Image (cartoon, rainbow, N blue to C red):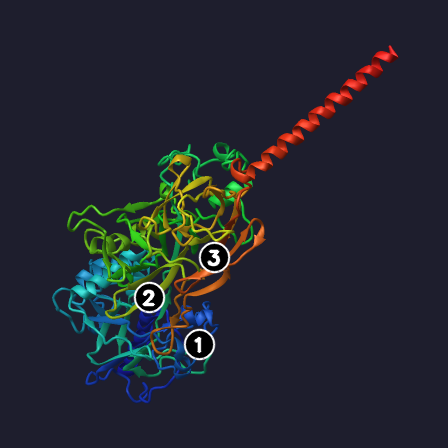
Amino acid sequence: MKKKLMSRILAGALAAALTLTSMIPAFAANGSETANLANSNIIDTSKTGILTITKYDMTAAEIAGDYDAGDTSRATGEQDTALESKLSDYAMEGVVFTYLKAGDIEQYSYTDSVTGETTLKVVYEIPTGLAAILGLDDAEDSLGDGTANDAVDMTADGVAEKCTTAGVLHYTSDQINTALAELLAGGTAGKNALEDYVNGNGGTAMAETDTYGQTTKSDLSLGLYLIVETSVPENVTDTVNPFFVSVPMTNLQADGSQTEGGEYWLYSLYVYPKNETGNPTLDKMVRNATGNAADTAGNSEDMSNIVTNLEDEYATYGTLTDQNGDILVNETDFALRRGDGTYTAGDAVGEYQYASTTTASAGDVLDYILVSNLPHITSNATTLRQYSFEDVLSAGLTYNGDMKIAFYESATDANINNTENAEKIWTISGVAGTDCFSVTSNTDVNGVTTLTVTMTEAGLNEINGVDANGDTVPANSYSDMYMVVYYSATVNADDTTVLGDNGNTNEVTLTWARTSSGYTDTLEDKSVVYVYGIDLTKQFADGSTDFADVEFLLYNLTDGYYVKATETSSGSGIYYVDGKTTDVAEAAIFTPNSNGYCKVLGLEGDSYSLTETKTADGYNLLDGEMVIVINAKSQSIQAAIAGYTGADGQQTGKTEMSVLSTTAAAVSVDGETSTLVESNGSEHALVKLLVVNTQAFVLPITGGAGLYAVTIIGVIAIAAGLFFFFGHKNQKKEEQVR
């Protein structure tokens, strides 16, 4: 009778102990075990345990509608094949769990010497160091009338089977559960402390979860185990909380089933902890930054009238005029041109606003920003171990060596790189071991430059919020903040700059990893800068080839500047734009070559006035300016979007980088639609113009042709005589009247 009573008490206590696993955010499981308490009413100490953990990406499953975040089902410790089948597409590969045996399972049997009453309960060995982390009191109280955290005294008089193991205390499952819940409720410090304890006290790492999201450890000696998630692939944002597992455990009743709990021992345990996942984002943008260093009055590099500064006010430039004094812009046009967000016009953005594409002249400075929303960081296991960018600039762009990184709380600030509101700005000091990032720049034989931006250990520690003890403190981390990598590049004033539709591309790849070795992912994006040119052919109506004295002047009507340019070689007629000026004396003079050809290469997509200021002797100049309007090509480019964990254990469902919409380049001349022709295989690159001069009217004064002069003089004399005759006759009539 006593033995039967003891068995039932032990079974009930162990069933209660199973609530240790209730701290695992897991699913209900159904199944059966052949051995039950009727046949095996005590723990079989000759057996060993098996622990199987299966990981699923519950964020992806919830998005797909295969999981309800409100599910409160509890784990039973038994295999659930139905669950495994349902969530097989979300299996998570590459997760590492580490286990540490905390101690043995023991039966506390205490008989009171006064009352003769015997108290029985199951207790678990907990090392003193672990008890301290859990906040359990080490004061032993065998009578059970002390505080809730008091350890059970297994050495007191009246204890049937004493435990004298050094360095351990004894607690019930209720005490351990309560302490664990309170510790984890206090934030990630407790989570990190338990991870550190397991790793620092000989914890054993299980094999990485496989393509089914599963890892198994067999031949576990019986006892109480602490399990922590120590390494995760790149997309895990929130690891499962540390949890205890009792090996063996009494079966639990499955929610919604007819299975009775407390009937048999489980030596083979199945756990289905959840993970939340999330990934960073990437957005590559560019804007024309020429003149950005100007003060609020626009004074910069002798370009005081050029609309290029986002801080410039309309009051300063409201009277911006062309070379004839005609007002160019109103307040709305000014704001649109700057692209400051004050005004919108469909999908149009100003060339000085960050966007996927922009237009620029050769010699212009471009501002590039890489905006990345950092992923969620919750503990040591979810820290970032790699965060790097590979940025490839086409041959027409030259990196200016001024890389910096800023961090923002606000996406709005990040997307305009408003450094005044930055939480932190990193620069490169050049002092070894102190910089938070490094930059390498390599240019290949084709002129393509690859920039590699890598977060150093110091930078990763700062992003992860690692303190002096090596622990992650999420409150101090840059979790979920916006990282902006920014630098400038110059559009080359030579034949490396691509004209037309092909554009001058800049492609970036973000690579990141967390704590699981070999598990990385990437995102891609790009920006494009479009540049154009004018291909002018000069002709004389009579076939003359006297082009040496022909001169043209080019004025940008949009921004109010004269174009500066340099001829590739004397007499070539090929000019590359390399500057802007408001002083006509500094403007480039464009002269065709001996064949009448003149090319002006490297123009931004704007409105221009082309004026013929000089021509060969004996020919007529054009009677006015040509107004050339180049509307640059633009594209809306969608960066790649990370997917989720799929059946292969890696990222699936990734959305590749794509072009959402395109506005084609177009040109008009004097208000009439014209055509842009190709250049070096790039369509819509050059404005094609033909300028024809006709002969002037010449009045010769020598030789046989002098008869014309005599005739003219004769005509004048006859007219004078007639005037005198009729005037004299009229005078006589007036006198007769009087």
**Residue 543, x across and y down, in percent:** 48, 53
Q: Which mark is residue 522?
A: 2
Q: Amino acid type of disc 1? A: Asp
Above or below, 410 relative to 97: above
Q: Residue at x 17, y 61 (%)?
A: 128
**Residue 302, x across and y down, in percent:** 37, 34
Above or below, 727 relative to 108: above
Tag 1 residue: 255
> Which numbered disc flags the more N-terminal residue, 2 or 3?
2
Q: Quadrant of residue 388?
A: bottom left
Mark 2 or 3: the one toward you: 3
- Secondary element type, mark 1: loop
> Which numbered disc flags the more N-terminal residue, 2 or 1?
1
Q: Which mark is residue 634?
A: 3
Q: Residues within 10 Å of mark 3 (few under 14, many from 20)?
A: many
Q: Residue at x 38, y 41 (%)?
A: 292
> Which numbered disc flags the more N-terminal residue, 3 or 1?
1
Mark 2 to mark 1: distance in Å? Answer: 41 Å
Above or below, 298 relative to 432: above
Say which of 173 and 365 sits in front. 365
| Residue 322 seen in the figure | yes
Task: For the residues labelled 2 and 1, say whether their Cβ atoms are less than 8 Å apart.
Answer: no
Q: Residue at x 25, y 52 (%)?
A: 462
> How many dots with numbers?
3
